[in-house]
Amino acid sequence: MQGFGFMNHAPVVPLVMRDAGVSPAAAGFLTTATFLSCAVFSIPLGALTDRFGPKRVTAFVLALLAVSAIGLAAAPSYGFMLATRVLAGVSLASVFVAGGQYVTTHWSGARQHVAQGLHGGSILLGVGAGVFVLPALSEALGWRAAIALSALPAVLGALVWLFAARPGAPSVRRAAIASVYRSATLWRLGIAHTSMFGTGIVLGAWVAVYLVSEFDLPVAYAGFFGSLGLLIGAAGRPVGGVLVSLGWGRPRALIVVTLAGILVALAVMAWPGRPLAVAVAGIAVAGVATSLGFAPIVALAARAAPGAAGAALGLIGLHATFAVVAGAPLVGALWSATGSFTVPLGALALMPAAALVLALGLPRD
């Protein structure tokens, strides 16, 4: 439910640019505001989740998410749009921090990898559903009405969560927050997660524009093809958890392989003159490559800081926001300057390349 709402602006960016006179770089800053807010609130939400438990924190942020959607639909100015993205960013931070800790609290052992994968997959399923549904709704009803309707999943999700979620006890043994910051393993995992989740979100923010500008696809068709990577990722995250739980893949190896896959996907999408079929194949590969390593990263992070799992996941989530905070407007600015996505996607590939080198230093499991 949260995935559908915190990135609800991305699928309608072409229409917002047209109707509100927003430049590509300014449109990118809508995503930047979301993830900058996520960065600011990740560590505090981690501490609050350790203190109050994930159920209460999640219920609160679902309400904020509904408010952010309604506010964006009624936004009278670009500045107001940015403010609503700040609220959406709080929800985004809680998805990883409170949601990840909820899974850590209620599942253990091999089942935890599967549960983390299912949780992560549901996030991408929500984002992918938004990319798929909102462009068509926007063309039929206008983008403001479509954004207003995107508040409904958050409201329904809050009601279901309050009645169905099990109480999550606060951490019994709390570790010092300083120990989280000193963990080299957590920093390496955070940078790897940055290159997976961050790259996936930046691509999700621009994929509709990429397909419209590079191949002259209508917005609705661009939304359909653009949702492929996210929907594949929704399945890929649970698959990654299953692979680890069955012993068919080691966490470190899976992380390294998926980072290499991201580089391949970006190279395919950036290739000058590539046909539509090749570009769509690159989007699909990106969906797989940005998702399979999610469950191992979250499980290893919680294991690295057992007395401060919320803070550890907050640190991991904080890393991921930097890719989007810098990447979304950078892609927009480079596209605006060059007129194609070859240079923007090439620049985006620098991040997973660095993460791949660092991931080789993760402890063997």
Image (tube, rainbow, N blue to C red):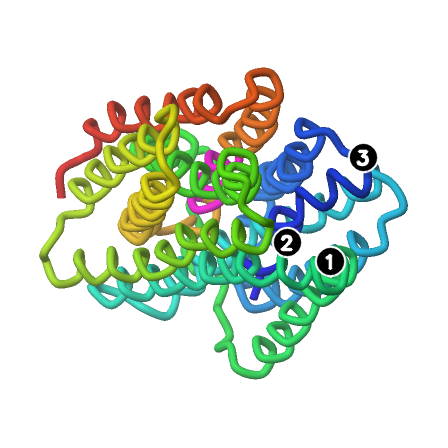
> Tag 1's secondary structure?
helix
Could you tell me which residue is drawn at 77 percent across and 62 percent down? 145
Q: Residues within 10 Å of mark 2 (few under 14, many from 20)?
A: many
Place of residue 248 in the rendered image (x, y in percent of width and height, measured from the top left): 9, 56
Give the CA distance from mark 1 to mark 3.
20 Å
Find the residue positioned furthest to the bottom: 163
Numbered label attached to residue 8: 2
Nearest-to-viewer mark from 3 and 2:
3
Q: Which residue is mark 1?
A: 69
Count of residue discs:
3
Q: Where's residue 282, x and y in %?
A: 33, 40
Which residue type carries mark 3? Gly
Q: Which of the numbered marks, if any, corresponds to residue 21?
A: 3
Q: Residues within 10 Å of mark 1 (few under 14, many from 20)?
A: many
- Residue 24 at what x, y percent from top left? 67, 30
Asked if disc 1 and disc 3 are in contact, CB closer than 8 Å, the reply is: no
Quadrant containing the N terminus is bottom right
